[in-house]
Image (cartoon, grey):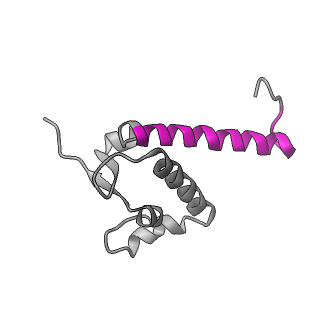
Amino acid sequence: MWVAGDATHGVKRFLLQLFLWFAVGAYFTRCWLKTGQTLAMQAWRLKIVNQRAELLTLNAAVARYLLASASLVLFGLGFLWALVDSDKLFLHDRLLKNKIIILPNQK
């Protein structure tokens, strides 16, 4: 905001939203690549892995973020998919053959 000034409407608003979308994407992608977990996923003991139980590749992490973003734009339909999916997977995870696993308690 200090650099761009008022970004409440017009092109500046769009560019700010685009910048924030990229920044959030960088956070999620980095977390999924390095540990398979965001901070919230660590708190809930969840981890995203591919079908071989390995961490996501860069392409898979970026694709997951893009598809999850598209799902949000479409009123969360890809997330609601988990309600009817036999394995309780989000639509983007079903398409990319990823899954969220629950980690065991650490004592």
**What segment is highlighted magenta in the picture?**
6-33
Q: Quadrant of the N terminus?
A: top right
The reply, left or right, for residue 33 in relation to residue 65 is: left
The reply, left or right, for residue 87 in relation to residue 77 is: left
Residue 37 image-quadrant placement: top left
Picture residue at 34% right of the left edge, 51% below the top: 49
Residue 58, horizontal then vertical, whole percent = 48, 44
The reply, left or right, for residue 51 in relation to residue 1 is: left
Residue 25, horizontal then vertical, whole percent = 56, 43
- Indicate whether 74 appears above or below 64: below
Q: Main secondary structure of the magenta part?
A: helix
Q: Residue furthest right?
A: 10
Picture residue at 53% right of the left edge, 57% below the top: 68
Q: Residue furthest top?
A: 2
Q: Quadrant of the C terminus?
A: top left
Task: Reply yes or no: does residue 71 show up in magenta.
Answer: no
Residue 48, horizontal then vertical, whole percent = 36, 50
Which is more toward the observer, 107 or 48?
Answer: 48
Task: Reply yes or no: does residue 9 show up in magenta.
Answer: yes
Residue 12, horizontal then vertical, whole percent = 82, 39
